[in-house]
Image: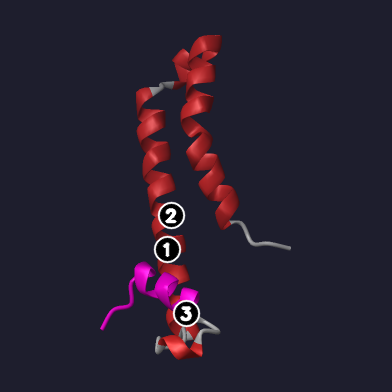
């Protein structure tokens, strides 16, 4: 049976509440889910970046308004990439 993110969230809420009868979170399941989510976020960021670059050819970025729009559109890509960076 595949464990979903919702399953993990529900189990995390039940940690420490032994009377609730909820199963404790399996750390291996959580680690696998995190790795799948990391891969998904990377793929989505790559796809979004390709879409944005496709809509904004390099020659149009010489105009300040186009550059601002490009940077605004890329904010989610930058945030996703920062979230995927290893923490010190």
Residue positioned most to the left: 1
> Does the magenta-highlighted stretch encompass residue 2?
yes
The residues tagged by marks 3 and 1 sit, at their Cα atoms, a distance apart of 22 Å
The residue carrying mark 3 is 14
Q: Which marked residue is nearer to the observer: mark 3 or mark 1? A: 3
Q: Nearer the viewer, residue 36 or 5?
A: 5
Badge 2 element: helix
Q: Magenta segment, which residues?
A: 1-13
The residues tagged by marks 2 and 1 sit, at their Cα atoms, a distance apart of 6 Å
Earlier residue among tags 3 and 1 = 3
Residue 19 percent across, percent down from the top left: 46, 90
Q: Residue at x 40, y 89 (%)?
A: 21
The residue carrying mark 2 is 41
The answer to whether the residues at label 2 and label 1 have Cβ atoms under 8 Å apart is: yes
Q: Which residue is drawn at 42% across and 63% down?
A: 37
Q: Does 67 appear above or below 81?
A: above
**On the rendered structure, is 2 left or right of 70?**
left
The residue carrying mark 1 is 37
Estimate how packed mark 2 is, as few (under 14), some (14 to 19) or many (20 or more) residues with alpha carbons within 10 Å. some
Q: Nearer the viewer, residue 53 or 76?
A: 76
Residue 27 percent across, percent down from the top left: 50, 84
Residue 13 percent across, percent down from the top left: 48, 74
Q: Residue at x 64, y 62 (%)?
A: 86
> Does the magenta-highlighted stretch encompass residue 44?
no
Estimate how packed mark 1 is, as few (under 14), some (14 to 19) or many (20 or more) residues with alpha carbons within 10 Å. few
**On the rendered structure, is 88 left or right of 43?**
right
Q: How many labels does the image show?
A: 3
Q: Does 21 appear above or below 72?
A: below
The answer to whether the residues at label 3 and label 1 have Cβ atoms under 8 Å apart is: no
Instruction: Quarter of the image for the N terminus: give it.
Output: bottom left
User: Majority secondary structure of the magenta segment?
Assistant: helix
């Amino acid at each position: 049976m595949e464990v979903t993110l919702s399953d993990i969230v529900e189990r995390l809420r039940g940690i420490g509440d032994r009377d609730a009868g909820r199963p404790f979170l399996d750390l291996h399941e959580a680690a696998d889910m995190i790795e799948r989510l990391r891969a998904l976020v990377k793929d989505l960021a790559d796809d979004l970046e390709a879409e944005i670059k496709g809509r904004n050819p390099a020659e149009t970025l010489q105009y300040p308004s186009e550059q601002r729009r490009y940077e605004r559109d890329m904010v989610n890509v930058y945030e996703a990439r920062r979230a995927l960076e290893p923490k010190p």
